[in-house]
Structures are given as C-alpha cells and as structure tokens.
Image: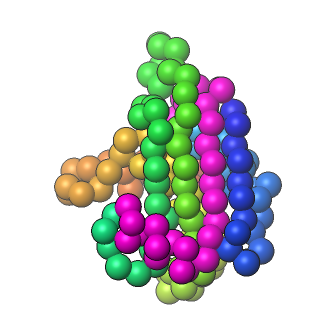
Amino acid sequence: MSIEILNESGRELDVKRLAELSRFVMDRMRVHPLAELCIKAVDEPTIAQLNQQWMEKEGPTDVLAFPMDELRPGLVNEDPEEGVLGDLVLCPDVAARQGEAAGHGTGAEIELLTVHGILHLLGYDHAEPEEHREMFGLQDELLAAWRTQ
C-alpha cells in the first residue's frame, strides 16, 4: 500500500502512527495491497476554503474525503480491486477542539477522523439513520481493534 502523509498544518503530527493506522484499517477492510491513499493535514483557513469549494459549506471542518477510483471493501472470497483510494484532508486544530470536548484528546480524535475518512473513501456514509448505525458501528469496531492490538 502506498500511504503518503503530508503535514501542512503547523501542528506536530505522528505521521508514522497515522500511516500504521491507515494501513491497519485498509487491511481490515480488504483494500487491495497496491491501493494508494494520501492524507494531508492542513490549517483551518485551508480546510475552510476546501469545505466551501467542494462541499458548499461555510467554515472549517474536521475531515474531508475525496474518493478517486471508488474502491469498495473487498469481499472475503474475491480479490480486491486495484486503484487509488483517494485523499483525506484533516484539520488538527479542529480535531484538538473536538478531542478536548469529547474527553479523549487530539491524538485519539485524529485517529477517529482518519478511520472515519477512510470509510467515506470506501463508500460509507451517514446521511440516513441505517447508514449512520452501520458506519459508526464499523468505525468503533476498527478503532477498538486498533487500540487493543
């Protein structure tokens, strides 16, 4: 797997751990071993501009997902599809506020947002109640497995 992480946020970021988490999630979701993922950490003005440009929403957000080849989780008895998974854009400043409010800190929030973003890249969404239950349940399972390995 090719996982590129760019930190343009001005904040310290554990790039190695983020790459390991991404690889762990992609493995668990049976993403092709040659799939590509890019994660970019940016500041609030940058993510606010991207949020406006691509989502038509005002202000900074925590994570944006830009799927490329519309890869989906691999099935147990089938070979996963090759391709580019896509790009995630994270904002550590927003993550810091959310992590503090949730009581688990910035690092845990960045991990949560990374898993959340990868699931979006794999086609999961949370607009409808059933989708929300499925996506957030899977997100919780993946994070729990990551933290207990």
Would residue 129 be seen by someone viewing this image from the given angle?
Answer: yes
Q: Nearer the viewer, residue 52 or 80?
A: 52
Residue 43 colored magenta? yes
Left or right: residue 145 compared with residue 118: right
Q: Residue at x 58, y 25 (%)?
A: 32
Q: Is residue 123 above or below residue 148?
A: above
Circle count: 0
Q: Nearer the viewer, residue 126 or 10?
A: 10
On the image, which quarter does residue 83 sit in?
top right
Q: Nearer the viewer, residue 126 or 43?
A: 43
Estimate the x, y position of residue 93 in percent, counting from the top left: 60, 81
Estimate the x, y position of residue 49 in percent, counting from the top left: 46, 73
- Tell me the colour scheme of the image: rainbow
Q: Which residues are magenta?
A: 28-54
Q: Residue at x 54, y 80 (%)?
A: 45
Estimate the x, y position of residue 80 in percent, counting from the top left: 51, 21
Q: Residue at x 65, y 26 (%)?
A: 33
Q: Is residue 118 above or below residue 108?
A: above
Q: Residue at x 61, y 31 (%)?
A: 35
Would residue 149 be seen by someone viewing this image from the given angle?
Answer: no
Q: Nearer the viewer, residue 57 or 132?
A: 57
Residue 39 colored magenta? yes
